[in-house]
Image (tube, helix red, strand yellow):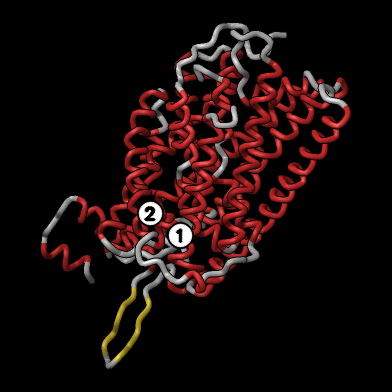
Amino acid sequence: MSHGGGGSTLRETTQMQALMTLLKCYIGTGILSMPKAFSDSGYIFGIFGVILIGYLCNLCIHMLVQINELLMTKPEQIPCDYQELAQLSFEIGPKNLRKYGRKSKKLLTICLCLSQTGFCCAYALFIAKNLLQLMINLKIGYWQDDDVIYFLGLLLPIMIGLNFIKSIYHLSMGSMIANFVQWASLLIILYNLVTNIPYIGDRKPINYRLPQFVSTTAYTFEGITVTMPLYRSMKDRKSFAKPFGVLNMAILFVIILYSSVGFLGYLKYGDNVGASITFSLPNEPLYMAVQFMYAFAITFSYPIQMFVAIHLMWPTIQNYLIERKKPDVIINMADYLFRSLLVILTFILAASIPELDLIIELIGAFACTSVAIIIPTILHLIAFYERTDGFQRKWLIVKNTLILIFGFLVLCTGTYFSLQGIVERFQDRLQSSYDDVDDLLTPSFNNDNNITVVRMPFWFDKLINLTQIATTTMNITDQPLNQTLNL
């Protein structure tokens, strides 16, 4: 069997391009959640935790590179992608495990789909929450923190339209602009964090919400889906994983940046820091611009993440339709329908769990830990078990077993605490809904000093809010209408 294909490789990516791609991959919305993660762990546990998790994720990527080097028997062979490695690691491993190669590949595909779909849920919620916070800061309408569902509804048709774009080239053009906006926004946030820093004694050096911290940090370090395609495209692949190579330098920079933003953000805003640092920024024009800029940037990052999920799932559906000799028109319509349903699914999930910190913790604990730590460690152990002996085999077993114990501990505890938090907040919302049930459908009347005040149902206020946003956007200055909206 030819591992990884037998054709020659188109090696186009330089070391600098690979480094920039890795940094762009890792420095996304996750970095904005690091101050909240530090509030869960305290700044001492936070710094050491970021170093540990960054090191483990980096080590697991090196494991995949080592498996690829084992499989490539000829210099011209193309390295395997992550899914191929999942199958081939079993097929070259112990004889009694070789039959599970294809099942391993399917399991990894499911985990990758879950992680990518989870990222899209977090992205959708992040955009909606930032736009909601911007409207609250601008005092446009009468919005509250729980009104994010209305902004998800406004975003849904836009995201469906963006995900109808099938060319990764056209998507990457928008992503380039988004990356520039995102970096500019991050620099403004860093400026805010280093000004008027409070006394460090007011912050906790150690806190004990460690499962939540580890889950959030695992979410930020999940870049393993990008590393294998990047490794395949390198001109000089040996420079990718060497001690001072592209991968180590990128992870080192990311660890420093994550630790800095987490520490400074927690130091600046304390235990009340938002799930995203953008939620805690001052109500000033510069920082309101940051909220809009980040929402704009992630709007173009969402279809990139969804492109990966579609690329993983659609071929199976397409092959099913082709086998049944469906015409091209039906297959094309099914493609657009599938894209629409997948976007709608992520928005439904985001609306069902409208808490950014909890959804990040859940994705980090369950999906990211599986994809970035547990699965690579298992594949590495299976691929090299029969190729080592003596002390090397014992060290392989001990090292990988310790990593697996850590990974499963994070998966179980992180998933449990995030689900517990989701249930508790859902119960709080449900109780609040029961308390306000009389206001849902009918107006209420208050008589003070012989004056009757009518308070309309909540949905009427939201209709007025949406109308006011549209009015402000179109710069309508009709005085009677403005008086009506200000009632």
Q: Name the residue under label 1.
A: 264
Q: Earlier in the sequence, mark 1 or mark 2?
A: 2
Percent across and percent down for residue 147 are 41, 60
Give the residue drawn at x 38%, y 52%. 151
Residue bearing the label numbered 2: 190
Q: Which of the 4 image quadrants contains residue 320? A: top right
What kind of residue is marked 2?
Leu
- Residue 214 is left or right of residue 282, and the answer is right
What x and y, as percent, mark residue 390?
A: 88, 29
303 and 141: which is toward the camera: 303
In the drawing, does residue 225 fall left or right of residue 151? right
Mark 1 and 2 residues: CB-CB less than 8 Å, in contact? yes
Q: Is residue 445 above or below residue 41?
A: below
Q: What element carries label 1?
A: helix
- The quadrant of the picture occupied by the C terminus is bottom left
Front residue of 366/382: it is 382
Tell me where residue 297 appears, x and y as whole percent.
36, 42
Can you name the residue that lies furthest to the bottom here?
A: 449
Question: Is 26 displayed left or right of 76 in the figure?
Answer: left
Asked whether, in this view, residue 204 is left or right of residue 181, the answer is right
- The crowd level at tag 1 (other Cα within 10 Å; few <14, some 14-19, many 20+) is many
* Position in image of residue 357 (x %, y %): 53, 56
- Which of 200 and 34 lies nearest the eye of the viewer? 200
* 45 lies above or below 70: below
Task: Identify the residue shown where x is 40% and y is 49%.
Answer: 127
State how far apart marks 1 and 2 are (Cα): 8 Å
Secondary structure under tag 2 reads helix
Identified at 64% across, 48% down, the residue is 52
**Is residue 218 placed above or below 326 in the rendered structure?**
below
